[in-house]
Structure formats: structure tokens, C-alpha cells
Image (spheres, rainbow, N blue to C red):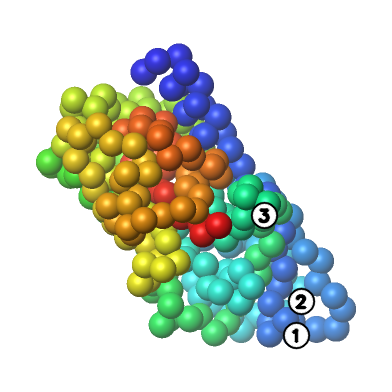
Amino acid sequence: MTELEVQVLDEVWSGFVPLKISLSKHDISFSGTPLDYYICVPRCSYLPLIVENISKHFDQYTSTDYVQDEIWFSYKSIPLKWHYPIGFLLDIYSSILYNTVILNIPFEIEVNFRRFPADTLLPYKGLKSLYTIFQNSLKESCAMLLGTSAPVLNLSREQEDKVWNCAKTGNYKGFAESTRDFSGLPQENCKLIPVKIYYQKLGNGIMLHPFQASEQKNVLDAVKEVVGEFQGKIVAQGIEIPGESDLHWLWKCLAHPDNFLYITLLDS
């Protein structure tokens, strides 16, 4: 790792997303206007991790016959995928104004206590569901990078817990100590670069697409392999990415804790 790469990683992992959370009008059961809930959360964290605090805040405004594991969030009535990193969700719902990427900060979302949209969101059975998805994603990215998920599978329970806690809190130093065998690898040690691309025109929006690490490829060429000709903006970790940026370098410095590089494409 170069000094610049370490600096970029530190800044990416210490990034926060300010949230303004409102209670859905469908869940207001008592008179009065619920006070919105404001919180800053790590970009690499996940919405289910703030559910307990959110439910306590809005308890006084809604009836108590809800199930905590069925609480979900939405943006402009669109259900938010609970297994996507919060920073990635912010990127997805950003916009372009005067040829500049605009992040919707604070990210104004709604919390919903009932009517879980099972046709849109994955089933959620508590934080164990989130932990399982994170671990599976980490194994998947490791298998792409090295041709095997053994380095993740061989982590001790103590190391697994440390990796997960560091991912939740944005602790890059602690994360790197436990994942040096499968994160931040030099290009010659990688088989495939694990990338997830979000583009509204892609069926369900997101596509898993690993790229050959042996090929020197910039991010625009990689994008064109997936979606064809593209003239819009490329965003990762809230940053507008120049098309000529090296794909491996971007993965190395901008990947989320599950070791995937999340790229969002915005039409101009």
C-alpha cells in the first residue's frame, strides 16, 4: 500500500452519511407531529443497525403492535434494500444538476413500522440475517479474487466478529489487520476484481460483474462491457469517478467492507 492509498482508505472508511428520518404517515397513530430523527452513520454501515434507536424515538407516535424485524425504510415511497450499504443507497438516489453529481444530503428517508414489502425486499429475520448476508458476500468476493473463499472460511470466530464490528463502525485499521489475506491485494495476486454495478436500466438495477484482474482496464471501459455505450456519470463512495481511473486501483481503495466495489451509473 502506498501512502496515498492508505490516506484514501482512511478517508473512505471514516466517511459518514447524515440521515433525516421521518415516520411514515401511515404509521402515525396519535395526534401531534412526530419529530424527525437525525443521525450520522458510517457510509459502510447498514440501515438495520439503527432500527433499535429509531423504534425507541418513534414509539410515542405509533401503536405498539408492530414487529421490530418488520421495520423498513423508504425513499420517496421506494423501499430501500436493507442489505445494501447506506453509502451505496445514497449514491443510487443521487442526481445530476448542471453536469455535476449532487448527493441528497441529508439523505431524507422514511421509516415504516408495518406493511413490509416482501415482494421487493429480501426477508429479514433480525440482525442475524444481515450478518449472514455480509459473510456470504465476503466469501463470494474472496472466491472471485483468489479462486477460493478459504481465507474467509478459515477466520476464527473472534476474527469474524472483529471484521463484522469493524465493518459496522467504519474501523479500517482493525478491518485491515484481520483481512490482509484477501483485501487490498496487489493486482498480480488477484484473479478477478469483484464489482457490483447499479444502473436503473439493468433489470433489477444491480449487476454482479467480476472483471479479469490480469487486464489493465479503466472504469469506463469496464462499464461499457456491461451496459454498452455510456455518457453519464460514474459514482463510487459518493465520488464522481473519472472514466480513465484504473479499475483495480478503485477496487483497492474504494471497495466496501464486503470487498466489492459498488459502482453507480447516473444518466446525464
Label 1: how many residues lie within 10 Å, few (<14), some (14-19) or many (20+)?
Answer: few
Q: Which residue is the site of mark 2?
A: 61
The answer to whether any part of residue 189 appears in the image is: yes
Pointer 2 with pointer 1, Cβ within 8 A: yes
Q: Quadrant of the C terminus?
A: bottom right
Q: Quadrant of residue 63?
A: bottom right
Pointer 1 with pointer 3, Cβ within 8 A: no
41 over 166 or under it: above or below: below
Residue displayed at 37% across by 41% down: 219
**Residue 50 spot, x, y in % from top left:** 59, 57
The earlier-in-sequence mark between 2 and 3 is 2
The answer to whether any part of residue 175 appears in the image is: no
Label 3: how many residues lie within 10 Å, few (<14), some (14-19) or many (20+)?
Answer: few
**Residue 199 spot, x, y in % from top left:** 42, 61
SS of the residue under disc 2: helix
229 over 192 or under it: above or below: below
Report how far apart the C-alphas of labels 2 and 3 lie in the structure.
Answer: 37 Å
The amino acid type found where label 2 is placed reads: Tyr
Q: Which residue is the site of mark 1?
A: 29
The amino acid type found where label 1 is placed reads: Ser
Report how far apart the C-alphas of labels 2 and 1 lie in the structure.
Answer: 6 Å
**Residue 265 spot, x, y in % from top left:** 46, 55
Question: Nearest the camera: 66 or 257?
Answer: 257
The earlier-in-sequence mark between 1 and 3 is 1
Residue 97: numbered disc: 3
Report how far apart the C-alphas of labels 1 and 3 lie in the structure.
Answer: 38 Å
